[in-house]
Each structure stands twice: as C-alpha cells, then as structure tokens.
Image (tube, rainbow, N blue to C red):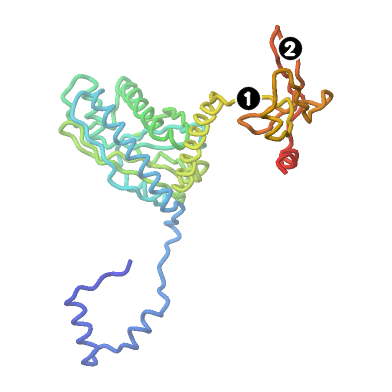
Amino acid sequence: MADVLSQSEIDALLSSLSTGEVDADDLKNEETEKKVKAYDFKRALRFSKDQIRSITRIHENFARLLTTQLSAQLRTYVSIQVASVDQLPYEEFIRSVPKMTVLNVFEPSPLPGRLVMEFNPNIAYSMLDRMLGGKGEPYSKVENLTEIEVKIMQQMFQRVLEVFREAWLSVEEMDPLMEDIEVNPQFLQLVSPNETVVVISFSTTIGDSSGMINICLPHVVIEPVLPKLSVHLWMQEKQTQRDSLEYGVLERHVKRAEVPLSVELGRSAITVEELMFMTKGDTIELNQSIDEPLTALVDAEPKYKVQPGRMKDRIAVQVTDFVEEEEEYDDER
C-alpha cells in the first residue's frame, strides 16, 4: 500500500512545484521507472505467505497447549508465546544457536528426515529443577549432564512432542519420536547448509526463568504437507467436511420422512348427469385392463408399475417396474 501524505507534506510538495524546485515531469519519470529489488539466492524464500501464516497459526495453538501442559506438570507459572516465524538457510540457524544448548532431535513420522526443537539452557534446566523438586532455578551445566538427567529430559521432551503432535493434527497426523539430545549444534547436521528452513521462536517464561524455544522445520522434511498449509485448501477441506456432515444429517432425516403411497386401479370419465342418477349396484367402467400393471403413486406422483395380489390375508401390490419420466409426461398430456 502506498504511503499516505499528511496535509503539511502535501502543502510542501505543492509549494515546491509552484516555485520550480521540483519538476512534475521528473516525478512522472520516477514513477514509470522499473524498480529493481535485490534477491539473495542464499536466502531463497521457498515458503509462500499463506504457508507461513498457516505455520504461525499451528504453532500459536502449540504455544497455548504447551503452556497448559507445562503449567500442570511443573506446577509453576508458565508463559509461552510465538515471538517470530522466519525462513532462512539452515546454516544461519545453526550459527544463531548458542554453542552450548539443549537440542531435542526427533523424527516426525511418517514425514521423512528429522526436526529439531532447541531449548535455551535457562528454560531446560528450570524445567529439570522443577521436575526434581526444586524451585526452578536456571543453573546451567550443559557440558556434563548425568545419565539420570538425560533420561528425565527425554521423558519431559517426549511429552512436549505429544503436544506438538496435537497441534499439527489438523494438518497431518504425525507420530513424533524422540531420537536424541544434543548439546553442541555444530555436531547437528539435519540438512545441507543452504537448505531453507522455517524457524519458529517462542518467548518463554517458567517461574523466574526466561529464554527462547526454537523449532526448526526444514523445507525438505515438511514438503509433503505443504499443499495442506494453503489457507484456501484448508478452508475448502473444512467446507467439504461440513458439507458432508450436513448431507449425512439431511439424508437421515429424509429417510425417516413419511410419504403417502396409493395405487390407482384405473380412471373413468362420466357426465354430471350420470353421477347424479347413480345408485347402489351401478358399475363404472375403468380404462384399465386386467392384463395391464397398475400404477403406484407417491405423493400423487406416478412412480412404480405394480401387480395386485394378497399377502397374509391382506391386499398388497408387488413392484414390477419404474414409471419413466416420458410416460408421466404422456399421461399428463
């Protein structure tokens, strides 16, 4: 959208035009000139704006679910909010991660490859301290984790992955499986350095500790579900699901609806005088032969050809054929 000029700026521009300081032709030429936008091939934008918006929406839901889950699990104040969603080369993401941190590597089955969820040490150790009965102090000793601490962290992060699965359920049914915990990002090579990734950063506060949680989604890993991240497709699927549900409800109601069914034995035309002098025992000749099938009418509309008979001491008819539309039209004529 073009910038809107204030009244003072408009007055200054008109004054410059009237005094000759600015030439109107120069302004026209400037507008018609082709503007060149620099493009960095190392930062290829492989995700559309629609897809970025969908990813943002998914992880805003993830932040809400994780806040609830950790608040109940750690029994302390927890606040998690999406701070930014950016696409950048994988190499740039690795350089932005601290040298010593907590990297949760997991497989998002059935999607190929691996994803990584990076927890700032302040956040990770605050969670660990709360799990061990402490006050949630953010002390850091990434370089010498014990086997017990690693095991507790793995169980803790597996619950986080269950929340991640629930957040993505509207797009893809994943089964994320914890693979490993790394502390040095230099040893973590998920994809090639130039591969485009989406990094979702969460501003996190747990008790008195604060830090960032980062999720790295490589393009090559989530490429199979990218078409589902289109807002148009998502809305279309929701509409289709809603239409299918409404159709099913409507179909059940229609099937239970009652309609009148009658069988026409034949027709005859008589005069009013004949009708007036008709007495008991008189016979009316019909236009229906006993060798021809009768017509069954549904709500006064001819639908079936039937044969009269009896069934368990009751008068009944047996459907032998359907009435074609052309026959109905001929009868009406």
Q: Which residue is mark 2?
A: 310
Give left or right: position of 264 versus 166. right
Q: Quadrant of residue 309?
A: top right
Few, some or many residues within 10 Å of mark 1 (<14, 14–19, 20+)? few
| Element assignment for label 1 | strand
Q: Position of residue 223 (x, y in %)?
A: 50, 44
* Residue placed under numbered mark 1 in the picture: 261
- Residue kind at label 1, given as amino acid type: Leu
> Where 155 falls versus 100 (above or below)?
above
Q: Residue at left 41%, top 53%?
A: 49
Between 187 and 309, which is closer to the camera in this rendering? 309
Residue at the far bottom in the pictured view: 20
Residue 292 versus residue 191: which sits nearer the camera?
292
Is 7 above or below relative to 135?
Answer: below
**Mark 2 crowdedness (10 Å alpha carbons): few <14, some 14-19, many ≥20:** few
User: Toward the viewer: 257 or 146?
Assistant: 257
On screen, residue 268 versus residue 226, left or right, reads right
Q: Count up the numbered dots.
A: 2
| x 69%, y 27%: residue | 277
